[in-house]
């Protein structure tokens, strides 16, 4: 709050506090709760100091002042301003950041580098930036990929995939996870989990998915690849194997005439062996906050949960480095994992947090 402003003008750290306040307001505006809190605490500490804090070292010794804020305190104390703030306060640049962050595969550091290079629009990026293939696609199909998919359209797209899959291998089972399984009216993408009875490695499912992708591409259903199968390491630490790309429902018949331009939809295929199906279902159903709380609960009980299974007694040595992976308790059965964790079963649509 700003109610203590008058008191701050008497304070030896008044200028520093004022600038930190602006940073705090900025982080509040962009919903960065973590940093907002960190700034609030540092400001409270600084208010109580009887002398002006001039250096990073002194600042860092104070309670609730971390290394990053300590460095900023020194910068403000010596220059009366903060370089970071010059752009944080620049509202139009917040807008640019938001726009860039909505490009597929673009994170905060990439977006900020582009801003620092002087790029302000998607056209700037298209013409002047050094783009990966996926980023270029994310810009070309920017509106498509930022349009949510209605539930009914997911059902139709999934039915198409299921029909083709059954022709390749009727023993393969497909399910739509993610926000669709949680009952959402619309989703950001389609998450299709692929499994088959008797499999204990996702590698067993790779030939099937390769064939499915080839056929769906030939039929005009799959229209772009973002992450191909062969690019993933099998079994290492991920879910095993995945394919990411874009799809559309192919236009019926060949009546001539221009087909109406369709919205490209994001689609993910996730290969999961039967032995890990329950754990994968939990992970890929989410939501991410629910997943985090389940993992935390597991670790409080001396267990470990990931997208492959629930493990017990993870032995840790010095510095909490894992000595063993822990013994697998359950992987295949979703309900059994809830039971072993001692939590009441929650239907997918009850897992929004
Ligand atoms: N997931 C997670 N942590 C992440 C990313 C994903 O736990 N950082 C899990 C939970 C998600 C699931 O994977 O529910 C699918 O990821 P999506 O990004 O597709 O998210 P949702 O399907 O939940 O939402 P959306 O409608 O945006 O696709
Ligand atoms: Mg999803
Ligand atoms: Mn997804």
Image (spheres, rainbow, N blue to C red):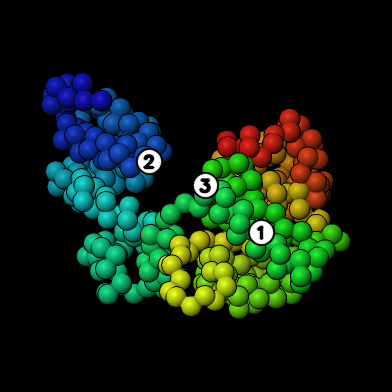
10 Å crowding of disc 1: few (<14), some (14-19), many (20+): few
- The quadrant in which residue 295 appears is top right
Q: Position of residue 225 (x, y in %)?
A: 53, 72
Q: Against 319, is 21 above or below?
A: above
* Residue 159 numbered tag: 1
Q: Most extreme residue toward the right, as rendered?
A: 198
Query: Which residue lies under the disc numbered 2?
Result: 32
Depth check: give the residue in front, 313 or 285.
285
Badge 1 or badge 2: first in the primary sequence: 2
Tag 3 secondary structure: strand
Alpha carbon separation for disc pair 1 and 2? 40 Å
From this view, report whether residue 124 is shown above or below residue 148.
Answer: below
Q: Which numbered circle lies on residue 180?
A: none
Secondary structure beneath label 1: helix
| Whole-number angstrom distance, CA of label 1 to CA of label 3 | 17 Å
Name the mark nearer the viewer: 3 or 2: 3
The answer to whether marks 1 and 2 mark residues whose Cβ atoms lie closer than 8 Å is no
Q: Which residue is mark 3?
A: 186
Specify the quadrant that holds the N terminus.
top left
């Amino acid at each position: 709050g700003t109610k203590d402003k008058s008191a701050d003008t008497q304070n030896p750290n008044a200028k520093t506090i004022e600038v930190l306040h602006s940073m705090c307001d900025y982080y509040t505006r962009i919903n960065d709760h973590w940093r907002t809190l960190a700034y609030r605490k540092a400001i409270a500490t600084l208010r109580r100091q009887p002398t002006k804090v001039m250096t990073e070292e002194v600042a860092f010794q104070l309670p609730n002042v971390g290394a990053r804020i300590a460095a900023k305190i020194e910068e403000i104390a010596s220059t009366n301003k903060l370089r970071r703030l010059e752009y944080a306060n620049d509202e139009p640049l917040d807008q640019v950041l938001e726009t860039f962050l909505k490009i597929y595969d673009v994170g905060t550091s990439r977006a900020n580098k582009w801003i620092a290079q002087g790029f302000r629009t998607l056209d700037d990026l298209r013409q002047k930036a050094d783009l990966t293939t996926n980023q270029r696609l994310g810009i070309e199909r920017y509106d498509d990929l930022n349009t949510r998919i209605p539930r009914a359209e997911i059902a139709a797209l999934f039915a198409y995939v299921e029909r083709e899959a059954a022709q390749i291998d009727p023993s393969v089972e497909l399910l739509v996870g993610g926000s669709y399984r949680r009952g959402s009216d619309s989703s950001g993408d389609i998450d299709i989990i692929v499994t088959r009875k008797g499999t204990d490695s996702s590698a067993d499912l790779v030939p099937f998915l390769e064939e499915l992708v080839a056929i769906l591409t030939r039929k005009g259903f799959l229209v772009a690849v973002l992450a191909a199968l062969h690019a993933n390491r099998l079994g290492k630490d991920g879910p095993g194997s995945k394919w990411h790309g874009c799809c559309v429902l192919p236009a019926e018949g060949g009546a001539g005439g221009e087909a109406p331009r369709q919205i490209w939809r994001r689609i993910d295929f996730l290969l999961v062996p039967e032995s890990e199906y329950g754990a994968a279902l939990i992970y890929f159903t989410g939501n991410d906050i629910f997943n985090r709380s389940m993992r935390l609960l597991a670790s409080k009980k001396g267990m470990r949960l990931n997208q492959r299974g629930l493990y017990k007694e993870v032995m840790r040595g010095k510095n909490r480095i894992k000595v063993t992976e822990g013994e697998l308790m359950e992987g295949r059965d979703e309900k059994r994992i809830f039971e072993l964790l001692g939590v009441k079963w929650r239907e997918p649509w009850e897992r929004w947090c």
